[in-house]
Image (tube, rainbow, N blue to C red):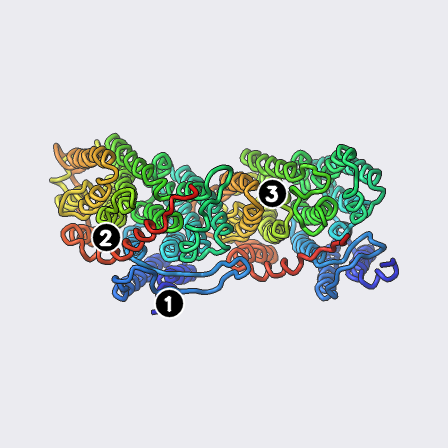
Amino acid sequence: MENILNWIIWFPIIGMVAIAFIPRDKENVIKITAAVATGLQFLLTLVLWQNYDAGNGSMQFMVRAEWIPSFNISYILGVDGLSLPMAILTALLCFIGVFVSWNIDKAVKGYFALFLLLDTGIMGVFLSMDFFLFYIFWEVMLLPMYFLIGIWGGPQREYAAIKFFLYTLFGSVLMLVGILGLYFTCGKTFDILELMRVAPEALNGVMWWGMSAIKVIWILLFIGFAIKVPVFPFHTWLPLAHVEAPTAISVLLAGILLKLGVYGILRINYGLMPDGVYWFSGALAALGLINVIWGGLCALAQTDLKKLVAYSSVNHMGYSLIGMAAIVAAGEANGMNLKAAQAGLGGAVFQMFNHGTISAMLFILVGVIYDRAHHRDIEGFGGLAAQMPIYTGITALAFFAGLGLPGFSGFISEAMCFIGAFPVYRGIVIASTIGILLNAAYFLWAFQRIFFGELNEKYTDLPEINRLELFTVVPLLVITLFFGIYPAPYLDIIASTMDEIIHHVVSLATFAGM
Amino acid sequence: MTNLQSLSFYYPELILIGVILAAIIYDLTIHQSKSGNVGWVLVAGLIAVAGAIYFQEQRVTTLFTDSIVLDPFASFFKLIVILATIFVSIVSLQSGELKDYRKGEYFTLLGIIVFGLFLMVSTVDLIMVYISIEIVSIMSFVLAGYLKQNTRSNEAGLKYVVYGAFSSGIMLFGLSYIYGLTGSTNYFLIQQAIATMDASANTALFMAMIMVLAGFGYKISSVPFHFWTPDVYEGAPTTITAYLSIAPKAGAFAMMIRFFNQVLADGGAMGGLDASSVASLPWANIMSLLAVITMTLGNVVALQQNNIKRMLAYSSIAHAGYMLLAMPVMSGDSIYAIMIYLVMYLFMNLGAFFVVITVKNKTGGETFDDYKGLGWEMPLIGVVMTIFMVSLTGLPPSAGFVGKFYIFASLIKGGNQFYWLVVVGGINSVISLYYYFRVVKVMFLEGERKDTILQPPTVMACMLLATAIPTVILGIYWTPVADWIQNSLTFFIQTL
């Protein structure tokens, strides 16, 4: 049990090494190996969940080892209510992703080897509690992603791959500067828990070029994370990368990679710079609003179904940002409204998970129709409801989940974000309800154009969704419906950690030296 | 220490001289077709020299009446130089470019460069500075033009001579100013003289230092003394290009660190160039500016290259810039960072050039088109080249990241007047991603899967792995290197 986090992170690497030794012609063996590696990883995360003590909001199952003592770099892993659901989601989507990529026929060996490396990179970011280690995993993701988009992607794949790479690298370079700044001002440690304890005080009153160090580091780290979220105006890599990537990689991109940004802000920015939270929360809510409106408008304008889903991610992550900003409700200036802060932060974290499952589902469904019709032009279909009734039904449910219909998990998390932010950012919340309208509009309009009306002559022999595809979509749909009706299991896991974060931010913010 | 006493501490160099002489004599006795064997003589001799340095008694002293020093700092650089020379010598035996030439002199000249570099890294005397630079330069001129029948190579040799003569002339002029101002050629005495010098001599001192900088700048190919680099790197035999991008650079950095640290920094002991610098010359600013311009120019121009060898030439200018970033701080940490960067740079840059050599042996070309689909055709080459490109960009987990990490860390630690340098350095890394990954792109993203897979020749494959594996391993666990450098960071510092 002590080493379960190690196993969860490194299991895919074992699979990758195994794949390296399988002859490249034995494609089925390679696929099964990948499925076994990710499947076992998923089982391990479930075991972790079973053994996780939800009542205790602090780090559990910690692993510590020395790594580079001369620079005080350690290998520290840990899991809490914030990272546990993300770890489960990562493992689940990677497992499903293997089956989504079952039909890959180009260089299968390389594909699955890189896929598993990507899995390790993502899992490592969620579980590492040493800032240096966190950074290494953060960067390890980039290379497999570059190849997965660049080799197995669509027509514009080369451009999409390098654009994704350049954007994220730019962000992570700024992040590195921030990390080093923290290291030297906060007693030369990369240990995140130690930094959480030391940083709020050590950064207090430090000035760099007439600006408070808290602001400088906050901005450096925020840009690094915001590019991943993506927060407007750093979102332009996203539609391109999502559209060009193969289906399984779009699933991982939307389902997990975007969550890394939000996770990073909550873990690092919130944990290390409580003063910065108060300073920036207004801007955060405003950026959330822009994401909601801008993403919604862009989605409405798309004719490519996959691009529409991609922009819906920009739209959905906006709710998360608004919910996160609500944490300041618990501060003294805002009447110590603890309930609002809990609702907002909980909503933001729940929204991360829900968007993970919903957008994964949407991308898989887009992939299904693309495999059959070889295009994704919304206008090019019509009347598919008669031709593919099961697919139509599932897509309808997925779209309803996407537009936040009550009964689906997305509704609950979005409502929580709004409820939390309402006492503090009333205007922003009211304005962002327009986003919900847009949200409904683009999904329903797209649905209407694809499935209703006259059946396009070309598609009279389009086959129905098959079992393998159903196997990848249905579990996600079940999760979405389950949490939509009964969200308590999820909220119970995160509750105590959310309380700790709120307490940490509120009690350590001094408002001095800004 | 007197000359005669010094000899007993000088045996690694004496062994090296013996090896060079043995190589010359051996070369005279064998037929051209076997002249490659001289390379093995050199490799064996260098391993012996490395052993001698490694097992030499660790002590800090001056030799030959204060003209050179023996200290762990010098030993570190000597071992780096030997490692690079061994790699390059073995690969030279496989190179297709050199196949039709007699290789005896080639290896002898390499041996003499090693000797010159040994002097460079340990000198504390202006005369010796000049002599050691000239030894290295003149041998490099010949080697750059070694391919007699190739006009590009001839051009490279000639250009190198012209620029070399020019910049060493300027440097010599600057050195004469310093001698005139201080009345000495010895670093320690110069430092004392400058410390007590009248402020009215500052302008002259400033001019002299700028001129000396021209000499150093030429050797590490920093802007604006870099003009020779692309042409020479492109025309010279690729093995020599690889060598020039590492060994003389390491030697020049060692010499530069010693010079500025001893002559200009107050008290000598890595005190920092900034406020405490002697004669209140704005060295930190000059160095910062030089570093920023060097790496930015290197990276921006590299973006437009179509020849991979030339692209790597500009990339090596950029890397000189990254290392120069740490110079303005001139603290123990920044010197440490430069040293660790050099170790990492050695593996990744040599490796990249070795790939160029392997590909040229196979396809005869060096442009991006020659690399099209290479990753599918020769997966080993594709994978190791990707590793080197990742590392040169500075992405973790690779050796290049560790080097950059230490450079940036030393700057952040140096104080907030250096933070902007870190941001500029970081943005430069992002720019460099584009051209390094262009290589990866043509190798993997273009072209299709092939049914037959080609492997490079065994020796070449071994050399590629010998550079690629450390590039990865040192990116994950570099404590041994870090400890080694920590122990080497003892200067010979004369206390006043």
Q: How far from the left and from the top, in percent, is residue A12?
A: 37, 60
Q: Mark 2 lies on which chain?
A: A
- Left or right position of B319 against A439: right
Same-subunit check for callouts 2 and 1: yes
Residue with the mark numbered 3: B325
At horizontal 65% and vertical 55% (from top left) the residue drawn is: B87
Residue most extreme to the top = A301
Element type at mark 1: loop
The image shows a total of numbered marks equal to 3
Residue B100 seen in this snapshot: no
Question: Disc 2 or 1, which lies upstream in sequence?
Answer: 1
Which residue is rendered at x = 30% and y = 35% of the image?
Answer: A286
Asked if badge 2 and badge 3 are on a common chain, one would say no
Given residues B309 and B336, the one toward you in this image is B336
CA gap, disc 2 and disc 1? 30 Å
User: In the rendered image of this protein, does residue A509 appear above or below residue A81?
Assistant: above
Q: Is there CB contact under 8 Å for labels 3 and 1?
A: no
Which residue, given by chain and number where applicable, does mark 1 sit on?
Answer: A3
Q: Callout 3: residue from which chain?
A: B
Q: In which quarter of the image is the N terminus of chain B?
A: bottom right
The amino acid marked with disc number 2 is: Thr
Q: Position of residue A494 (x, y in %)?
A: 26, 56
Q: Name the residue under label 2.
A: A472
Residue B86 is left or right of residue B12, and the answer is left
